[in-house]
Structures are given as C-alpha cells and as structure tokens.
Image (tube, rainbow, N blue to C red):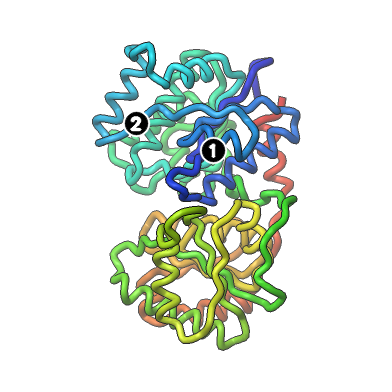
Amino acid sequence: MGTGSGHTVSIGDIGVVDGMMHIGDEAMFEQFLDQARARGVNDVVAISSNPAETTERYGIRSIARFGLTGSRDEMLARANLVLAGDLPADDPAHETLDAIAAARRVVVTGAGNLASTWPVHIIEHWLIAMLADRAGVPFVITGQTLGPELTASDAALLSEMLDTAALVGVREGASFRLADTLGVPEELLSQQVDDASFLAIDRPTPDPGSSPYCLVSLSTHVGAADKDAFQGAVAALLDDIAARGLDIVFLAHFGPIDGDPLRGDVVMHEAVRTRMTAPSLVEPTGTSTEAAWLARRASLVVSSRYHPAVFAAAAGVPTLGIAVDEYTTVKLTGALGAFGQSGVISSAELLAGEAPAAVARVRAEGGTRGNPEKSRMWWDRVVGD
C-alpha cells in the first residue's frame, strides 16, 4: 500500500537507551523491516528513541521521536504545538515532520500498548496519524493491542487515530472487538498474530547446551501480588520443573546489554534464582533473533512477558504464561490462543500453588507450529505495492 515513489516511515518503540534492550519491540520492527525488504521496499525511515543506535543496528536512516514528555497534559500540549507548526527553527521535530510529509506510507509497528497506562503511545501515534492524514499519506497500523484500560479522553484520541487509518491490524480478540466498537470498517480491520511471530533467524545464536531446557522470562511487574511471595512461588515452580528433567535457563527480554547488570528483568530473575534449590543458567540479553531462537528451541517456556510466549507458541513450544493484571491477561491469552494454546494462569493461581498442574497440562497437550501464510498475506497488504 503506497502512493508511489518515496520512503516508508515506521514508528515503533525502538532504540536502545541507557544500554537497555527491549527485545519485543525491536523484534516487531525487525520483522517489519524484513518483510518490507522482501517486497522491494528498501527505503525505510525509522522513528527511534536513539536514532544513531537504530541506524547502526539496522543500516537505515533513523530520526527522532517528537519529544513528548512529562504529564499527559504536557505531552498533549507538545503534540498540539507540533500540529500547529509552532516550533522553533532548531526543533529536531522538523526532520520528523518533513519525513512524514514526504513519505509514501507511514506504518505503526511495535509499541503495541495503546492503553491509558502508557498515554505517550496513544498521543504520539495520534499525532503521527494527524500529520499523515494532513499530508495525504496512507497510515497503517499493525501488531497492536488496544486497551483494555482506556480513559474517555484517550479513547477519543484512539478513535480519531483509527478513523484515519488505511489498515488496522490488532493481535487479540479483545482488541478486535474494541476496534470494531470504535468504528473501524470491517474491510480495514484484521486480527493477526503478533508481528514478530515468524521472525527469521539467519544470524549466529547462543546455545545453552544440548540438554532440554525451560526458558524463563519474568517482568518485575507483578500487579497487586506480593512481590516476595510471587518470587517464592515462581522459584518453587521452577524447582519442580527442574526435578522433572529440564534445565532452567533465564533470559531477560528487557535487560542490559552493557553497564550495570542488575537492571530490568535481571532484578526479578536474580531474586527468583536465589530462592531456588535447583541450579539455573542465565543467557545474556542479546538480539531479537537470538531470543526467538532460544524460545523456539526450548522444551517449555515460562513467562510473564509477552514476546517469549509469542516466539514459543508460534513454534509449537508448550508455554505457561503468568498474567498479573487485566492487561497481561489479554496479551498472554491472545498470544497463546492464536496458536491453539491456553496455558495462562493468574498470579493468584500461581500463589495458590496451581502452577505445577498447569505446566503438566500444557506439556501433555503439547503445541502446534503456526502457519505463516496468513501473516505473509497481511504483510502483502501492509507493504506490498
């Protein structure tokens, strides 16, 4: 989908800042870039939190985000200044404005958290949609979760953004129903698996050894659960899994690639490891393709994060998702359900000791590898000319 010659602008939540890598968002962008290039779309301009790092990582031109910081009101005020063109001559947003105005298409891929919990994504994507609409540039949305938490004001911005879209791709049934409620026409709305489900692996990857293993990825966010009790329950679960013949391997999906090692998911992982009696291994946070390979090669995945479940379920790997609130329940249920799995438990069920039985169930049921054909057809619509 395009308007002729010119570049494609893409916005995700990419760019390594302060040495912290967020594998899931980078994976979604990387898959978009791979699919665009496979269809002859080679001139991609990425909007990034760290343009220099993104340019080095992917070999493409990268430009800055719009500088939406502070409270929601402050972010919205900045967005309206950008829309009004009331910016100083040296404001870095001018480069991004010019890139959108001259694009053949604008694609949202990644940062799939369009909920009031993170208003910056709603406001930023709304701003980009308004700019693209003003310039007559097709605006395409792919790989998104909508809600479930939405204030009235955020729902209004989301509705206005969706109203400009040439295509809308969402990841779960709940998001599909919400988009339908917000008035997205049936012919423009599609429920897809996550963009990174079939990320290609063509680079050297780490190898935790030849023994069968359970890959573990845990966010520090535990919702309303007591964190110490949560960590103890996960440790007990992993000890049980180890006793049944699997090595335990930890991989931080939001973790440091340099500097202080005790940041991001590593903090939770180390807290769990100290409570375990079984030995465990740690794989360092690396690239998206390395993370996908580790998940696809595992015998079991246990995760409170989203993309380990996506990578694993798409490859037919039995997966236990630990949901800690309504948002993570929607995402993990959607990620596993897209590939015929249903192994999502709540933090309350974890603390009640129900996780070992859930693991036994998901391992007995097994998994089925996903079929990438529908995904290929979707990418044809997103970046095909």
Q: Is residue 291 above or below residue 344?
A: above
Residue marked by disc 1? 53
Please, what secondary structure does the residue beneath circle 1 have? helix
In the foreground, 322 or 362: 322
Find residue 92 and report its image quarter: top left
- Which quarter of the rendered picture does the C terminus lie within? top right
Position in image of residue 183 (x %, y %): 45, 32
Residue marked by disc 2? 68
Please, what secondary structure does the residue beneath circle 2 have? loop
In the foreground, 160 or 322: 322
Position in image of residue 34 (x %, y %): 69, 39
Find residue 226 and report its image quarter: bottom left
Question: What residue do we see at 61% from left, 77% from top?
Answer: 363
Question: What residue do we see at 58% from left, 44% from top?
Answer: 28
- Disc 1 marks a residue whose amino acid type is Glu
Q: Is residue 85 above or below residue 228?
A: above
